[in-house]
Image (tube, rainbow, N blue to C red):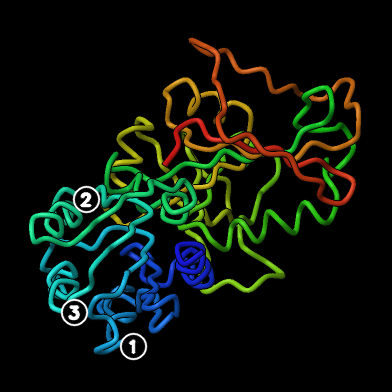
Amino acid sequence: MSLERALALAAAAPGRAYPNPTVGAVVVAGGEVVGEGVTEPYGGRHGEVVALEAAGERARGATLYLTMEPCTHHGRTPPCVDRVLEAGVACVVAGSLDPNPEAAGGLERLRAAGVEAELVDSFESRAQNEAWRTWVEAKRPFVVLKLGLTLDGRVAIPGARWITGEQSRHRVHELRAHMDAVAVGMGTVRNDDPQLTARGVDAVKQPRRLAFGRGPMPPGVRLELRTGELADELAALAEEGVQSLLLEGGATLAESFLREDLVDKVILFVAPTIGRNGPEFAPELLAPVQLRRFTAERVGDDLLLGGYVHEP
């Protein structure tokens, strides 16, 4: 249960430590929670340090539960593994390993020092920092492909502005609010003049708004035009600190990213409508794309389907 509590602490503070990962931690002694914490904003204490300082001397001989192993890197703060050893905890249970080669190896350091260290390898722990993990490991943003579809796979209905309902559109704005950047293809730019902003939701900051393809940009459109090869553009965005990218259309852009294996997660809002003669989403791919961790959820009258191409 204490790892679940650590997950809940981190879930309540998504993106708080950007560009660092957010880690939740709980200290348990004698069956009682004696300290808990979550990573502070960038430059502040990491989650396990917050929890250990809250526990004080009660941390000695206790068990520390945390969503990711303590770091071994000396950056803006000292290595967390050193603080864990100083606190004298007897056991550490981590929900995931640190994929950053500069900071990884915390559990190994603890074992070498005589501390019992267990890796649970929790998908939930990895998923909480999925964008950061991809940014660190693949040197590109975590890419989410979002599409609105009819039951027969149409991405637009002639004469209709929307495919999906109001509740689905609200969920899209919530999604935008948690992404570093949102992008469309030039066909969507010319046909729809999309705003790509997060509206009607609490957004700490607006995402960068991008268009992939060839110019020129239509007059009055205020999107960043990215004209290079997709892999090169993603690498450049990662260098600029973009950890997550939401693709909102159209079908040509979605096909291009899927063909180059640059999509990590797919989200489909399926409306209870047969589009009949609208444009169809039928990408020509080199091989089938299998989704993992597949989920289905009712959103108003629509069905929200999701899954991972690449698990975090």
**In the image, 41: left or right of 222?**
left
Query: Where does the image place residue 79, in percent across and percent down from the top left?
Result: 14, 69
Of callouts 3 and 2, which one flags the residue occurring earlier in the amino acid sequence?
Answer: 3
What residue lies at 38% left-to-right and 46% top-to-bottom? 121
Instruction: Find residue 305 and report its image quarter.
Output: top right
**In the image, 89: left or right of 229?**
left
Query: Where does the image place residue 277, in percent across and percent down from the top left?
Result: 86, 20
> Residue 54's mark?
1
On-image quarter of the C terminus = top left
Residue under numbered circle 3: 87
Query: Where does the image place residue 207, in percent across and percent down from the top left?
Result: 50, 61
What residue lies at 47% left-to-right and 41% top-to-bottom? 143
Cβ–Cβ below 8 Å for labels 1 and 3? no
SS at mark 1 in the image: helix
Q: Is residue 18 above or below residue 150?
A: below
Q: Is residue 162 above or below residue 106?
A: above
Of callouts 1 and 3, which one flags the residue occurring earlier in the amino acid sequence?
Answer: 1
Residue under numbered circle 2: 100
Type of amino acid under label 2: Asn
Foreground mark, 3 or 2?
3
> Residue 3's mark?
none
Q: Is residue 247 above or below residue 219?
A: above
SS at mark 2 in the image: loop
